[in-house]
Image (cartoon, coloured by chain):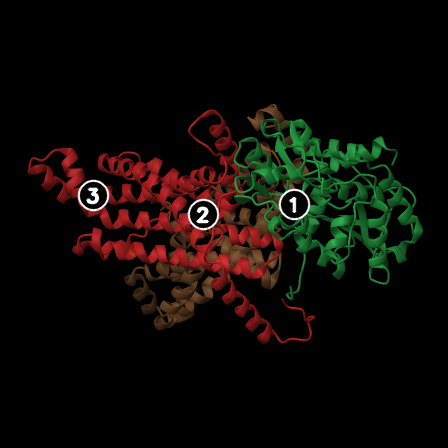
Chain colours: A green, B red, C brown
Amino acid sequence: MRRSFRIRTVGATVLALALVASACGDDDASGDVPADGPTINVGSTNFGEQLIVGEIYAQAMEAAGYPVETSFNLGSREVVNPALKSGEIDLLVEYTGTLLTFEGGTSTTDSQETYDALADLYSGTGLTVANYTPAQDKNGIVVTGAFADDNGVSSTSDLAAMNGTLVFGGPPECPNREFCLIGLTDVYGLDFAEFKPLDVGGPLTVAALEGGEIDVALLFSSDGVIAAKGFVLLEDDQSLQPADNLVPVLRREIVEAYGQDLIDLLDSVSAKITTAELSELNKRFSLDAEDADVLAKDWLADNGF
Amino acid sequence: MGADPLGAQSIGSRLMEFLGDLAKWFVENWDGSGGYLQRTWEHLQVSGASLIAAAVIAVPLGAWFGHTGRGGFVVVSLVNVGRALPSFGIVALALPLTIWLAKTVPFISSGLGFLPTFAALFALALPPIFTNTYAGVQGVDPEIVEAARGMGITETQVLREVEIPMASPVILTGLRLSAVAVVATAPLGALVAYGGLGRFIIDGFAIQDDVQIVAGALLVALLSVLTEVAFTWSERWFVPSPLRRTAESKDLVLRPVV
Amino acid sequence: MILAQTNDAFFRWDCVFSHLDDIWAKVLEHLVLTGIALGFGLAISLVLAIIGLRFPKAYPPITWVTGIFYTIPSLALFAFLVPITGFSVLSAEIGLVSYTLLILIRNIVAGIDGVDPAVREAAIGMGYGRRRLFLEIELPLAMPVIIAGLRIAAVTTVGLVTITALIGQGGVGFFILSGLNRFFNTEIILGTGLSVIIAVVLDSALVILQWALTPWARSRSAVV
């Protein structure tokens, strides 16, 4: 995309005010203050988990005294990735395997391997990665419990038996994604009767699956809704989905400005984010309608930050 | 697309490239379940359904109120509230209701897509049709109405054979305003899983495909203009010729645009 | 019902009250976006209206061009702008301002045209020059019609601002979008309700303004 990309500054500031300085609890930056440096602008894409982890890292940094700003809800990867590279945002929580593939690398199902490849790819560029989290969030092919029982499916390959009859629902960008429709067609040989563009693992997709308007949905493996609704996450038996650990990607100049202390802080936060915890946070966000910033604050408090 | 960094190409050539991509899009995307012919048809379906439903309710009601002369306050309030309701909000609000409806009512198969879009567009179309019909019927020259009564016909006949025909330019204007507003607002349906031309805009936003976004926007704008033109021409068939000029001047309720 | 399972109540007042700061911030943003649009819209419309009045031949093209903007559906217009001006306040404002132009120009011209010719002649007879005539006679007398147009423009703009949530702005439209992205009725109702309230408040404020600016019309009832 050759047009110049600008993030709404007024909107971002107001959003930052609305999301970081929440009314549900006060949150003042205190603690040891590193040397005066550039503001770290934390960005995120547009679904709940991104908001929550974005908040976690942002609040952790702020509590340690770093100057932090947030620009959340920007849009899909096509929006945030250029934003990170151009410096509109400074830090983004990404997913190792999917990001690696997006950047042209080859990902595997091994977390360490994928992470190392990503770190290598970014060496010598303006971006770098901190450590990855134990938590993973992969694309999940999901059906209802009833569907799984009636049709005896437990893995994605099982769906091939019903080619041509099933309706698949997912985010609008799914047909463009290698780990979504493209992969399902190429690797699994699946042929859906119809694809319905819904939302990014949100209420529309869940409602459509529940109501039977779609047979198969794309949700996210760390989404607490799956367990809560008795959905079945089909096994990725052909290993289409790469290892997708969460990883903070940040601009090298930020690291240069603040040094290893910042990386250590991020790593210490990352080490505590497990898939189980992430699922729980996601569930509370989507189903219990709790706020991302409150969830982040509580989680940080519970984990000693 | 656009592999050159910012400085290498002039704005002019980038624009030409974009227009070329746009033209290519129109050539390639007309068919299939996601093609723009299908999407246009979906767009017209939900627009037509909501317009007709609104007219069926609002024309008789408006005519009746206009005939009896009561309810002026209702009219004014309806116009004000109707204009103040954000369509985006209505579409979003309709969703949980229609989802619930689909679960409890057996013959409704889907709470997503068509229903919430229809609900929002119906709400949008009601006020202009109602208020214009009311104003049109009420504004018929009282002498003519009296003369008709004097001829001994019933009240209903007065309404049907005198007042409504005389009010037809204004009524048709109301229908036209609603129709254009509905066609213009239907893209919001893409947010609640409907198809229609809004799909190109919303999906284009999702993957930052400028060509798709602009193509969708162009199609919606075009359809909107065609709707306006179609209704303006239809006056020729529905409105008795001596009354045609009054239609434009009675633009009582400027169309609420989305 | 999904929402019965997830939210105990249909509308959660507790969540509203615990977020008053955020809500207020969004309301302010909404008012700012609306205000900028109306301000620029009125300024541009006044200029174009004066041109149209002064050079009657220019009037049809002016209404034609502004009419085109009016016909372009709002989501489509914002969609056109995003590739050029990005997800920014500028994109939102360009769209919002365009929608006010036709209404305001038409009403300003209609208002001025509607001034009683006898009054105009009397003023000229008393020695009023063209500019004084416009500023001190025609414009004040046209106020009711102009403000009627301003009211329509204001209410319409408030509704349109909610849609700008889709391009990163939104004011209280943010709540509608956010509520749509997760199972949250309360947010959607909040966003919609606030939009209506803001529109009604603005409308009333303009009615009061009209009342204040036209003391000679107070004995007659205001036009809708």
Asked if disc 3 and disc 1 are in contact, CB closer than 8 Å, the reply is no
Near-viewer residue (A301 or B201): B201
Which dot, 1 or 2, sits closer to the camera? 1
Disc 1 marks a residue whose amino acid type is Tyr
Disc 2 marks a residue whose amino acid type is Ala
Residue B244, image x and y in percent? 22, 56
Residue tagged 1? A188
> Mark 2 falls on what kind of element?
helix
Residue tagged 3? B164
Between the residue at mark 2 and the residue at mark 3, the CA separation in whole angstroms equals 29 Å
Disc 3 marks a residue whose amino acid type is Ile
Residue C101, image x and y in percent? 45, 59
Near-viewer residue (C101 or A226): A226
**Circle 2 crowding by C-alpha within 10 Å: few under 14, some 14–19, many from 20:** many
2 and 3 marks on the same chain = yes
**Residue A222 visible in the displayed image:** yes
Disc sitting over residue B186 in the figure: 2
Left-right relation of A256 to C153: right
Which dot, 3 or 1, sits closer to the camera? 1
Give the answer, above or below, for where B82 lies relative to A173: above
The subunit letter for the residue under badge 1 reads A
